[in-house]
């Protein structure tokens, strides 16, 4: 496809390069094709050149059937954002037998159709009638659809106002009455002090902001470019602002806000909705407000979390989520569930952590690691919490029981390296971003420097190709929960972009 330069202002012309965009569209790299689609979508909104808009519409419609699933999704998102006439693409996606869509399974076809329709209002009666007919044509195949596909199909029906005769009881496995929900939603009538809760949130956010710009960098390069990290830095190769927040902070605050706004109760439907909202905002390039702070940049969501979030925001029920993801994206966001240990039934926190983590990380290692994070945070938030000792590790071990043999083994290894140098500990425990690695190395750093926040996070960050932000965020949350916000470095607190968001979240929880 060759694009004609459109008549727009000079700034917009500088931003959109037709030749480069055409070249990227044919690149073997899926990331470069996605960049091209995003450029086309943005320029479509900026200009009024009909020739370009016609070419762009054709390109986006074609790329919905790209060989790579992430490119297909990006094309559908751009179609929704630009509100390009979706008739042809929807017909190709929803017609029961067409050669162009045979490479896509039915679930993805329905999901892509829903994404496209997110930006479109059915005001054209002919289009509405045709799309409704296409959707209705699938009704006879209902009994052969798997539960996830049924969820998204029902969502499609709702999108276009197709009346269905089924009830929720006809959707086995989609809406599950689960035994813990009523009990776990018991209102938390007491809670940690403002000082400790604010400390936990700020400790996490500071560790995240210090580590995010340099995560996974080789240690030699980290030292050469930044020295020993003692303040916020900017990595010019990453779109991350000074003292900003990655997904660790954003999802943690969203989780606490979901509990608070629901009357201090846990409800898996609301947690799932928050995750879905965050990933939808990521996909559509929208600002992602979290307690009044906008993050119009890439917050660093893991690709597996993004894929799970896409299932959620296109209608797959949280109880059906089964992405076997062993990384730390669940563990990094569960510290807010520690407040459920105040005034709730004993298993409320455990159940909430297990369910919410499985929405994106349905793997025993990921769940066990998250349970360790939440258990330690809840213990340290108590007013009588003491400096960490081996009993804390043993309690965390008992909390996840036999769920993950690998986590049990790694905690045993942790005990043997608590007094070792960080290089040796990193080699023994791992620092890869796998949930077990991240949580155990965070524990090592916390035990190594339980009374010195800066030394602790430096231990988390000054490692070779490590998951610096999540390790520092988790360890930082524990430190803040134990000591309170007054023990955190004042200069790092004051210059943190998310300072007020953390303080507001803690204040709202404590004040009820």
Image: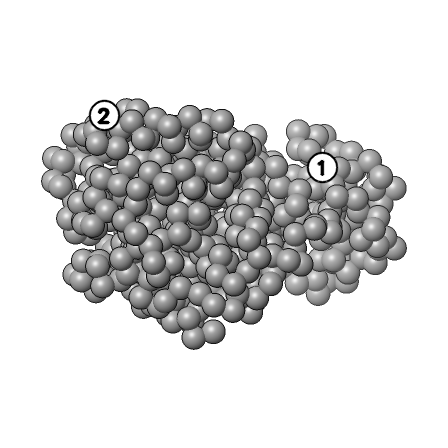
Q: Nearer the viewer, residue 318 or 112?
A: 318
Colouring mode (rainbow / by chain / secondary structure / one colour): one colour
**Nearer the camera: disc 2 or disc 1:** 2
Q: Residue at x 47, y 68 (%)?
A: 190
Q: Note whether residue 156 is visible.
A: no
Q: Position of residue 222 (x, y in %)?
A: 18, 36
Q: Please tell me whether residue 236 is drawn above or below residue 463 in the rendered image.
A: below
**Distance Cα–Cα, label 2 vs label 1:** 49 Å
Asked if residue 118 lies left or right of residue 305, the reply is right
Asked if residue 62 lies left or right of residue 42, the reply is right
Q: Position of residue 307 (x, y in %)?
A: 54, 41
Asked if residue 160 lies left or right of residue 489, the reply is right
Q: Quarter of the image holding residue 363?
A: top right
Q: Please tell me whether residue 13 is drawn above or below residue 460 in the rendered image.
A: below
Q: Nearer the viewer, residue 10 or 261?
A: 261
Q: Residue at x 48, y 38 (%)?
A: 398
| Rendered image: mark on residue 424 | 2
Q: Quarter of the image holding residue 507?
A: bottom left
Q: Note whether residue 358 is visible.
A: yes
Q: Residue at x 40, y 67 (%)?
A: 505
Circles 2 and 1: CB atoms closer than 8 Å: no
Q: Nearer the viewer, residue 20 or 28?
A: 28
| Rendered image: mark on residue 404 | none
Could you say whether the residue bearing mark 2 is in a helix, strand or loop?
helix
Mark 1 neighbour density, 10 Å: few (under 14) some (14–19) many (20 or more): some
Q: Position of residue 406 (x, y in %)?
A: 46, 26
Of mark 2 and mark 1, the one earlier in the sequence is 1
Could you say whether the residue bearing mark 1 is in a helix, strand or loop?
helix
Asked if residue 99 lies left or right of residue 2, the reply is right
Q: Which residue is mark 1?
A: 106
Q: Please tell me whether residue 389 is drawn above or below residue 268 in the rendered image.
A: above
């Amino acid at each position: 496809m060759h694009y004609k330069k459109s008549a727009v202002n000079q700034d917009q012309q500088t931003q959109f390069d037709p030749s480069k965009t055409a070249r990227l569209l044919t690149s073997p790299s899926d990331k470069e094709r996605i960049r091209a689609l995003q450029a086309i979508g943005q320029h479509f909104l900026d200009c009024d050149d009909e020739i370009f808009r016609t070419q762009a519409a054709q390109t986006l419609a074609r790329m919905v059937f790209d060989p790579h699933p992430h490119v297909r999704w990006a094309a559908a998102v751009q179609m929704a954002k630009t509100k390009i006439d979706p008739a042809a693409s929807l017909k190709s996606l929803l017609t029961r037998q067409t050669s162009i869509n045979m490479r896509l399974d039915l679930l993805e076809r329905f999901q892509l159709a829903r994404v496209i329709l997110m930006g479109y209002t059915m005001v054209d009666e002919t289009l509405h009638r045709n799309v409704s007919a296409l959707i209705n044509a699938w009704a006879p195949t209902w009994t052969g659809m798997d539960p996830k596909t049924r969820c998204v199909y029902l969502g499609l029906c709702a999108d276009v106002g197709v009346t269905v005769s089924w009830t929720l009881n006809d959707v086995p496995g989609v809406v599950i009455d689960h035994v813990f929900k009523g009990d776990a939603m018991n209102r938390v009538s007491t809670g940690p002090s403002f000082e400790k809760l604010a400390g936990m949130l700020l400790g996490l956010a500071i560790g995240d902001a210090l580590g995010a710009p340099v995560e996974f960098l080789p240690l030699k390069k980290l030292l050469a470019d930044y020295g020993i990290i003692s303040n916020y830095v900017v990595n010019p190769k990453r779109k991350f602002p000074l003292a900003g927040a990655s997904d660790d902070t954003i999802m943690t605050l969203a989780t606490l806000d979901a509990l608070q706004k629901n009357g201090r109760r846990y409800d898996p439907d609301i947690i799932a909705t928050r995750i879905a909202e965050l990933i939808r905002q990521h996909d559509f390039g929208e600002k992602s407000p979290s307690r009044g702070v906008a993050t119009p940049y890439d917050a660093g969501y893991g690709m597996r979390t993004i894929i799970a979030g896409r299932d959620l925001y296109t209608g797959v029920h949280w109880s059906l989520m089964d992405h076997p993801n062993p990384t730390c994206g669940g563990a990094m966001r569960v510290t807010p569930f520690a407040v459920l240990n105040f005034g709730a039934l004993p298993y409320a926190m455990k159940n909430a952590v297990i369910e919410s983590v499985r929405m994106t990380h349905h793997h025993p290692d990921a769940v066990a690691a998250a349970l360790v994070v939440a258990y330690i945070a809840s213990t340290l938030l108590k007013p009588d919490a003491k400096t960490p000792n081996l009993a804390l590790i043993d309690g965390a071990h008992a909390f996840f029981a036999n769920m993950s043999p690998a986590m049990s083994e790694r905690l045993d290894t942790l005990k043997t390296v608590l007094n070792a140098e960080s290089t040796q500990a990193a080699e023994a425990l791992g620092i890869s971003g796998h949930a077990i690695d991240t949580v155990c190395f965070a524990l090592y750093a916390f035990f190594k420097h339980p009374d010195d926040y800066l030394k602790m996070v430096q231990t988390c960050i000054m490692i070779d190709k490590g998951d610096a932000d999540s390790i520092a965020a988790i360890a930082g949350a524990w430190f803040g929960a134990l000591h309170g916000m007054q023990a955190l470095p004042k200069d790092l607190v004051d210059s943190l972009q998310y300072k007020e968001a953390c303080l507001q979240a803690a204040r709202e929880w404590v004040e009820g």
